[in-house]
Amino acid sequence: MFIINNNENVPLFKQLYMRIREQALSGKLPEHAKLPSVRELAAELSISRNTVEAAYQELHAEGYIYSRQRRGYFVSALDLHAEPPTPAFKPRPQSPPVPPALHHTYDFHPARLDPGSFPLALWRTCLVECLREGLSELSVYGDPRGDRGLRSNIQQYLERSRGVVCDPDQIVICAGLQHSLDIVAHLLKEQHCSVAVEDPGYHLARAVFRNNLFNIVPAAVGSDGLDLETVRASGSTIAYVTPSHQLPMGCVMPIANRRKLIEWAGSGNRLIIEDDYDSELRYHGKPIPSLQGLWPYGNIIYLGTFSKILSPALRLSYMVLPQSVLARLNEQYHDYFSSVSLLEQKTMAKFIEQGHWMRHIRRMRILYNKKHDVLIESIKHEFGSKATILGQGAGLHVVLQLLVQNHGEAEIIRRAARNGIGLFPFSTTCVKNKPTLTNLLLGFGGMSALEIEQGVHLLAKLCF
């Protein structure tokens, strides 16, 4: 007898399913026992046949019962005395849940964008236009390298603004820089095992290469960029660099060192990965031309992103692959599909075609230039001769180097957090070359001018 309750919130078919399953698992319903027919059980419980049939179908699909033609349903042999398999390894204790991110009144994180900067109305218009066109491509997977129209637009933009020389077929659309680096690491690890990285430098790039089992060789960064002597002596065959705006120090690799780096890569089976993450945000003079443009047919992988100007939430980035690496991509990834939404790719292509992208860049350059200048003036006013500013004139952050006795980075960050100030640790960007002076990374993109002034004023009180 199966008891169901019409007053329960659980659907009747689910109640019946659970009652039969419980009795089968407990042995009350023996193996191969015949169940009542659908008609009999429906009459017995005063429910519809459809309800009984739904319960039986669910039990049959999960293997608790089986059917015989014209004879009905029977209980399956469930081997109730079987021991559960012993795990091959001890399960790791569960980590405590990740606490929610703290909300800071003054957030100096170097990767924050202005909250009102996203061109919502224009983006919505382009998105709706794409939908109205009734794209037939939305019913297929498309090119694994990404939408051809977007790649063509990116190629024209890079040639015009960054001096990159390439064909649209060399461009691959990715879901953010992390995704780009992961693909690159996967493509290169068969022929390369060691990568030279800037120290201090971008911690995410190091993590991606480390997770792909590369040996990480830190090379110190000076005013001329990466220390090439360390790279040469290390035996590394890959160099990851941010030559147009070094992250985090903000220096620009001069042409002489760029040529030396190219000469190093050209003298063997070596390769340069150029991360051009925020090249559009230069506030004085023209943007620095790309390294790739100096050696367009050489072994340089060029990485770019829409995260620093448009939105990091869109997860849109791109890379330009040299022919040797492109051949490897076509060989290893020909069965893959693009990881980026085609609708967003189409929207971005239209956004560029209609001139919105270049106008948006100009607006953002003006907006962030004003915030940059407010930050510089605030630091000079509040810190005076106690600190110096490194890496000003570009990007979304500067490095504040404290010149007098202070509480040290860790203690300053703790004090700042207690007072509503968010600071990203400069030490996270370092591998071996720990600075002798205290450096603080100060991003300004996510705050208003007034918040920048108030935040710097409060920070100055907490440092000494």
Image (cartoon, rainbow, N blue to C red):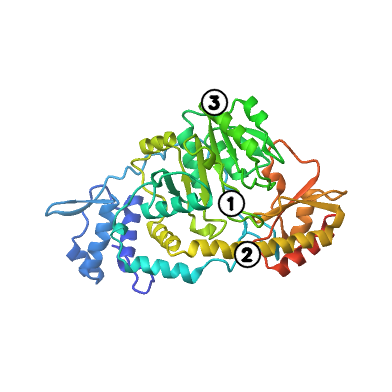
Query: With 351 as the anchor, is 18 left or right in this view?
Result: left
Name the residue located 57 percent from the left edge and 44 percent from the top edge: 93
Q: For this rendering, which residue is in front, 313 or 70?
A: 313
Q: How busy is the neighbourhood of tag 3: few (under 14 within 10 Å), some, or many (20 plus)?
A: few
CB atoms of marks 1 and 2 within 8 Å: no
> Dividing the image into 4 quarters, which one contains the N terminus?
bottom left
Label annotation for residue 254? none
| Residue position for label 1 | 279
Give the number of marks. 3
Identify residue for label 3: 267
Residue 248 point in image, percent of width and height: 67, 47
Residue 335 or residue 135, whichever sits in front: 135
Task: Name the residue: 80% across, 41% down.
Answer: 436
Amino acid type, callout 1: Ser
C-alpha gap between disc 1 and disc 2: 15 Å
Label 3 amino acid? Ser
Q: Is residue 108 visible?
A: yes
Which badge, 3 or 2, comes first in the chain's sequence?
3
- Expressed as whole percent of the image width and height from the top left, the position of residue 92 reads 55, 41
Q: CA distance from mark 3 to mark 2?
A: 42 Å
Give the mark, 3 or 1, whose residue is nearer the N terminus: 3
Q: Disc 2 on helix, strand or loop? A: helix
Question: Callout 1: 10 Å neighbours few (<14), some, many (20+)?
Answer: many
What residue sits right under mark 2 in the picture?
366
- Where disc 3 sits, the SS reads loop
Instruction: Give the residue type at disc 2.
Output: Ile
